[in-house]
Image (cartoon, rainbow, N blue to C red):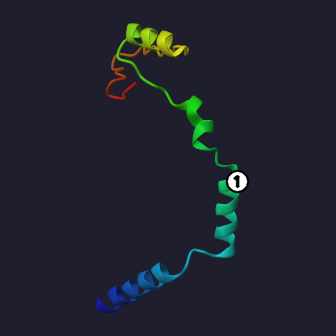
């Protein structure tokens, strides 16, 4: 059993020390960064939640923005807790 554990530890240690920065990894990361949207390009996907419809309408009017209304028709739907 000790021999197995020593072999396992040696294999894990060796695997941890192998550099993941191979040309293939670098190429994939470069390609990912080329296609990854910038933060300002993702702004339209960020939802600014309001506690009530009236609060959302007031804020939308003040900021000249639309209201995105989500209606939950479920027995256990609760947006405040994130469960819907």
What residue is rendered at 35% in x and 87% in y?
A: 4
Q: Quadrant of residue 53?
A: top left
Find numbered disc 1 in the image and state the secondary structure of the residue it sits on: helix
When the figure is inspected, residue 22 is found, relative to residue 83, above or below; the finding is below
What residue is rendered at 40% in x and 88% in y?
A: 10
What residue is rendered at 51% in x and 14% in y?
A: 67
Where is residue 69 drawn, in percent x and y? 49, 14
Q: Nearer the viewer, residue 64 or 56?
A: 64
> Does residue 50 appear to the left or right of 19 in the view shown?
left
Q: Quadrant of residue 25?
A: bottom right
When the figure is inspected, residue 24 is found, relative to residue 2, above or below; the finding is above
Where is residue 33 drawn, in percent x and y? 65, 55
Quadrant location, the C terminus = top left
Q: Nearer the viewer, residue 38 or 79?
A: 38
List the residue tagged with mark 1: 34
Where is residue 65 drawn, in percent x and y? 55, 16
């Amino acid at each position: 059993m000790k021999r197995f554990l020593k072999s396992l530890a040696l294999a894990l240690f060796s695997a941890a020390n192998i550099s993941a920065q191979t040309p293939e990894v670098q190429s994939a990361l470069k390609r990912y960064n080329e296609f990854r949207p910038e933060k300002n390009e993702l702004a339209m996907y960020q939802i600014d939640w309001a506690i009530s419809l009236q609060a959302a309408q007031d804020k939308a009017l003040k900021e000249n923005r639309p209201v995105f209304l989500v209606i939950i028709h479920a027995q256990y739907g609760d947006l405040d807790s994130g469960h819907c």
